[in-house]
Image: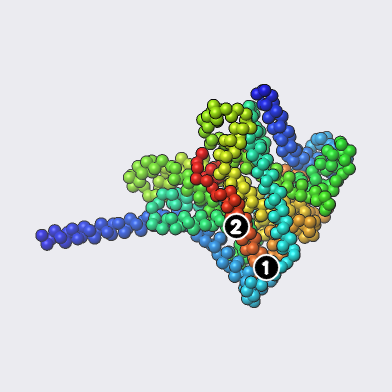
Amino acid sequence: MRKLGHIGTHLVLLFFTLLFLVPFYVMVRNALATDVEITAFDWVWFPRVIQWKNFTDLFTDPFVPMGRGFLNSAVITMLTTTFQTAFACMAGYALARIPYKNRNLVLGLVLSTMMIPGDALFVPSFALVARLGWVNTFQGLIVPGLFSAFNTFMFRQHFLDFPQELEEAARMDGLAYFGVFRRIVIPNSWGIITALGSLTMVGSWNSFLWPLVIGQSRNWWTVQVNLAVYLTAQVVRLRLIFAGALLGALPMLIAFFFLQRFIAEGVARTGIKG
Amino acid sequence: MLIGTTQSAMNAQTRQIAARRRRLRTTLEFWGMAGPLVLGLLIFTFVPLIWGFMISLHDSRGTINLAKFVGFENYQYLLANPEFLKSLGVVIQFAIFIVPTTFALSLFLAVLVDNAAFAKGFFRSVFFVPTAISYVIASMIWRMSIFNGLPYGLANAFLWIFEVAPISWIGTVKPPWYWLVLVTVRLWLQVGFYMILFIAGMQSIPAELYEAARVDGAASKWTLFWRITFPLLRNTSVFVLLINIIHAFNAFAEFFNILGGTFATGGLLSLARPPLVYLYQIALSSQEYGRGTAGAFILAALIILATLIQTRISGGLGKESY
């Protein structure tokens, strides 16, 4: 009976596994096939000859500036991840440990912004950024996304649980708060930094609405915007569209492969502390 | 005697100065570390709220500056505009479809993965990995390959085995198959994320509770789930619902990319256009910023209202910690 239950569980799991892998399979098959193979009436399971030239054709297709798109996305993602994590981490520490008299007021202010649904208010944010003259600039694409109240809150919760004796010993030795933070706290917090940083990175690389609104001219399109434009092109080039999709997905898939443990931990933390 | 008092007064004074200096130092150290974040939040969260609200009270078209003051006319216009009201209806309908299905499927997968006797990590990864894929890329796969409505699309090729004629998944109104396309793409993308939350919640339930229940005669896994696991996942459940509802109301990318033409012009968006796509069209394509900002505030109010109702119904986050 127990054994039967196990077999049942695994059969259902296997079914969902296949279902969840189908989109990946379709993407990879199409990216490596010819248009004839993709549109064949009888399903072609795998391309007869792998079409590596789909990838080179993608970058020489004048319809979308793919190379520039990858450069834009890489710059935006790297800067956003680095600075958003750094700002949130520092502020989280200050809010957890530095006994400044208005600390709770500042904490309340930060937490109150978590109530505001950010995406819904993209038009007001656009109005400000346009007013600053930041449309079609890296600052417009990056700077408004560097301040995460949520990550700050997560870091604060983590630092509250940090063993205080270690920090106090360092304070006795005359270190300032920032010194304690840099020498004692950071070296012992790489787990949560990687976890929250990875989530920020994936979110930044995959974001669509803000880059679409701010990066309006071709040169400022990110990978996602390029793909969205490609998707609705008048002349549909299926093999190139999917070569683009595969390349666009690859960086985060690779990151997932190496960082999955941290990312999952980061997600799990959000639930418990949120 | 006299010298002594002066000296102790001087001591008190130096102590006071030292204390003030320490406080100043603490203040400086605090702002040195929290300053960048707080300043950034003020500029990029609070300023848009104030500036955007002012624009929403003006007839600002083709300009992001304040044009003629019109009071709440933009709000009145939108709340009487059938297109905008329809978009609110669309997103409510979408929330009704996506929130329960996401909740049920992610909890179901979490239970299965947690109960797997082997390859637990593998199954968990398979369901979690779509989280790494963007809405744009998933929309491409759904629109151009799986549900493209042509005979060579995967869904139709599969149904052909059972001699079902090709279905136009995205283009038909009756039956509205496009909902199936829109709901499945989001399910695939987000279910793994919520599954991880549920698994984390389950793993923090003490094993003794299950032991105790077994001693009390609750034998089957089914009973154990409903008596122990599910009630103790209350906090996680409330959190999952909350995030899920907010995300549903902010739906944009899959509608834009599955139904839309280039830059959301034309296409099939008339079938189901959520508010963010509508606002994108009036603010970015038609440059009606006054109405666009007004619509943003109406939507934000609706989201806050929906989350408040949800928290009220579920009685808020419980105090119990598991």
Query: Local crowd at mark 2 within 10 Å, few (<14), some, or many (≥20)?
Result: some
In terms of secondary structure, where does tag 2 sit? Answer: helix
Q: How was this image coloured?
A: rainbow
Ranked by sequence position, the earlier of labels 2 and 1 is 1
The answer to whether any part of residue A261 appears in the image is: no
The chain containing the residue under callout 1 comes to B
Residue B30's quadrant in the figure? bottom left
- According to the picture, the residue beneath numbered tag 2 turns out to be B304
Q: Are marks 2 and 1 on the same chain?
A: yes
**Residue depicted at x 55% and y 49%:** B316
- Circle count: 2
In terms of secondary structure, where does tag 1 sit? Answer: helix
**Residue depicted at x 33% and y 44%:** A173
The chain containing the residue under callout 2 comes to B
Q: Is residue B320 left or right of residue A1?
A: left
Residue A260's quadrant in the figure? top right
Against B216, residue B175 (above or below) is below
Residue A262 coordinates in the image, percent (x, y): 56, 39
Residue B228, disc: none
Residue most toward the front?
B217
**Quadrant that contains the N terminus of chain A:** top right
**Residue depicted at x 54% and y 57%:** A113
Q: In front here: B104 or A65?
A: B104
Label 2 or label 1, whichever lies nearer to me, is: 2
Q: Is residue B112 left or right of residue A34?
A: left
Residue A220 coordinates in the image, percent (x, y): 67, 57
- According to the picture, the residue beneath numbered tag 1 turns out to be B291
Query: Local crowd at mark 1 within 10 Å, few (<14), some, or many (≥20)?
Result: many
Residue type highlighted by circle 2: Ile
Residue type highlighted by circle 1: Arg
What is the spatial separation of the Cα atoms under label 2 and label 1, in whole angstroms? Answer: 20 Å
